[in-house]
Amino acid sequence: MPAAPSDVPSESRQAADLAKEAQNPIANLISLPFQNNTNFGLGPQDQRTQNVLNIQPVIPAPLSKNLLLVTRTIVPYIYQPTSATGNEGDFGLGDINPSFFFVPRTKSNITWGVGPTVVLPTATQKFTGQGKWSAGPTGVVLVTTNRMVFGALANNVWSFAGSSDRQSVNQFLLQPFFNYNFSKGWYLTTSPIITSNWEADSGDEQWTLPLGGGFGRVFAIGDQKVNASLQAFVNVVKPDLAGDWTLRAQFQFLFPR
């Protein structure tokens, strides 16, 4: 006897469930996001534009029946425009940043993970990296409901080695995120990246505080599941030379189990 219609997941329901997995940064889901951030209005005259393409593979691995290790790595390619002081613009690989989250498996709607994060001085140009080895703790906690996925990711890194002529690193990052899911894989989203540079020069603003958001959709291209989103953020608090606003476009390949 065929299953009743209510027992057969609809394509719309499957897309919504996959969207919630894609919005969970520590889900048991292999994915490959390409996230492009274009930062407008850099410099004292607000005339320069910086571009950062982050390739961010996410690979979960079971350590036991009750524990999952999720590796998230950011591989940035950066176009750094000519500076106000006349330094020539650079384009190249930035500092690679792997993070490792130990995630207890649970049937609860609350998920969390903690672990270390490391910044490697892999930049191929002087102005696309910090020239320092840095490390620190990172963690994420999130709540999943019928329609929403929300939570926050945070870390702080300190430099411990690297070029002696480069500034020491002591940086904090907080990324709250909120997603509201509709039918057919559509969703509204906001995930601003709030940062503080504790080593900022006296008189310059330590914090960068963006506000904004956007929308996205999970869909299929042939048999390949993908997640695409577009967000815009205005920096309401920022250092003097930071950009005024950011356009973030992301295209993510999903490999559900």
Image (cartoon, helix red, strand yellow):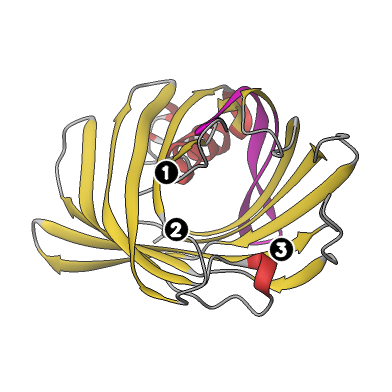
Q: Nearer the viewer, mark 1 or mark 2?
A: 1
Q: Position of residue 136 (x, y in %)?
A: 27, 57
Amino acid type of the residue that numbered disc 3 sits on in the rendered structure: Ile
On the rendered image, what quadrant is the N terminus found in? top left
- Say above or below: 27 vs 89: above
Q: Position of residue 219 (x, y in %)?
A: 65, 45
Amino acid type of the residue that numbered disc 2 sits on in the rendered structure: Pro
Question: Seen in the image, is 200 located left or right of residue 104?
Answer: right
Q: Residue furthest front?
A: 202
The residue that label 3 is drawn on is: 78
- Say above or below: 161 vs 17: below
On the rendered image, what quadrant is the C terminus found in? bottom left
For residue 21, the mark is 1
- Under tag 2, what secondary structure? loop
Q: Main secondary structure of the magenta part?
A: strand
Q: Are marks 1 and 2 in contact (CB under 8 Å)?
A: yes
Residue at 44%, 58% in the rendered image: 256
Q: Position of residue 96 (x, y in %)?
A: 50, 70
Residue at 62%, 33% in the rendered image: 239
